[in-house]
Image (cartoon, helix red, strand yellow):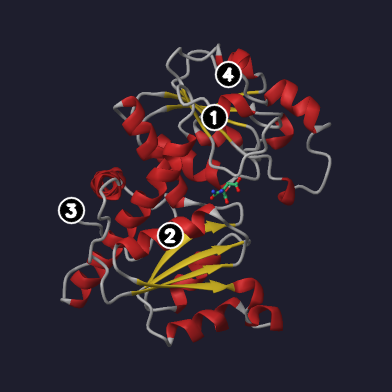
Amino acid sequence: MAFAAKHLLGIEPLSKVDILSILDLADQYVSLNRQANKRSDTLAGLTQINMFFENSTRTQASFELAGKRLGADVMNMSMATSSIKKGESLIDTALTLNAMHPDLLVVRHPSAGAANLLAEKVNCAVINAGDGQHEHPTQALLDALTIRRAKGRLHRLNIAICGDIAHSRVARSNIMLLGKMENRLRLIGPKTLMPAGIETFGVEVFDDMRKGLRDVDVVMMLRLQKERMDGGFIPSEREYYHRFGLDFEKLGHAKPDAIVMHPAPMNRGVEIDGTLADDINRSVIQEQVEMGVAVRMAVMDLLARARRASEDGGVMA
Ligand code: NCD
């Protein structure tokens, strides 16, 4: 199993084979994570630095656990209290860290393109853990793994992505990944929350949940990203829930075995009914969290292998 890339900055540059290599390896890590002894020494001796410039509970914990289970030395930089507050630029911080010889740098940043910029400046592998409204590749990969395990395949599925598409890096990365794998994608949400240029995405667009959900296999809900809105996108949360919130009645229009996903954090009663989110017969939200650790282990393992291969004089880019 090989992976030619030096970094994981987005889904866009990945081939179908790259995606399947990550998912196949992640399946093995799911098994490891379910054992009593979850420890492997794949990343022993390597240093992983997590730089989170935006608040994160799940994603940072997931990367930290993934690195620790693979035996890496993991350091979490709390950027809220770092020199950034004193006005140091992203690049200066990165160069300082680079001088400490990390092997893997995991970065989350509110600006689109931050991870790409870092990757140009440092020697180690950079993993994008979410850059502004641009990409969140490990989220799309963990979603793909969750879908593949629940549905037994990752192609020719009807998949609806619902809600605040415009502000969502999760939606962007998922649209690219699920499109590459040849699924039929529908985006459902108010017109005000659809990104510009949606016609070019190769998807069907709906502003009616009941019509859009008809016969879908997978319903992927998104959080209403209020922190990225400057007012005026929705009339009220109550009205939004009425029209676009997922409840059992609207889900009734999807296939009887359709699964429900949400990247979290959830606004219960705004984009999804709390009882539905907790219904283990329909919701795979907890599986998504479990798959997240395994996918991050797989990504870091593959990037570390690619680094070793290039250091050994291999042909990795
Ligand atoms: C997502 C993110 O940060 O983009 N969450 C996550 O990674 N668990 C989605 C969101 O914040 O709504």
Q: 10 Å neighbourhood of mark 3: few (<14), some, or many (≥20)?
A: few
Q: Secondary structure at mark 3?
A: loop
Can you identify the residue that label 2 sits on?
A: 63
Marked residue nearer the N-terminal end (2 or 3): 3
Marked residue nearer the N-terminal end (3 or 4): 3
Instruction: Examine the image and state in which quarter residue 8 appears.
Output: bottom left
Can you identify the residue that label 1 sits on?
A: 278
- Cα–Cα span, label 4 and label 1: 23 Å
Q: Nearer the viewer, mark 1 or mark 3?
A: 1
Return the x and y of residue 50 as percentages of the image width and height. Answer: 48, 69
| Mark 2 C-beta to ligand 1 under 8 Å | no
Evaluate if marks 2 and 3 touch, with contact meaning CB atoms under 8 Å apart.
no
Which amino acid does the dot numbered 4 rest on?
A: Gly
Marked residue nearer the N-terminal end (1 or 3): 3
Q: Nearer the viewer, mark 4 or mark 1?
A: 1
Label ID, residue 212? 4
Q: Nearer the viewer, mark 4 or mark 2?
A: 2
Q: 10 Å neighbourhood of mark 2: few (<14), some, or many (≥20)?
A: many
Q: Nearer the viewer, mark 2 or mark 1?
A: 1
On screen, residue 116 versus residue 250, left or right, reads: left
Label ID, residue 1? 3
Q: Secondary structure at mark 2?
A: helix
On screen, residue 47 versus residue 55, left or right, reads: left
Evaluate if marks 1 and 3 touch, with contact meaning CB atoms under 8 Å apart.
no
Residue at image location 21% in from the left, 72% down from the top: 308
Q: 10 Å neighbourhood of mark 1: few (<14), some, or many (≥20)?
A: few
Marked residue nearer the N-terminal end (2 or 1): 2
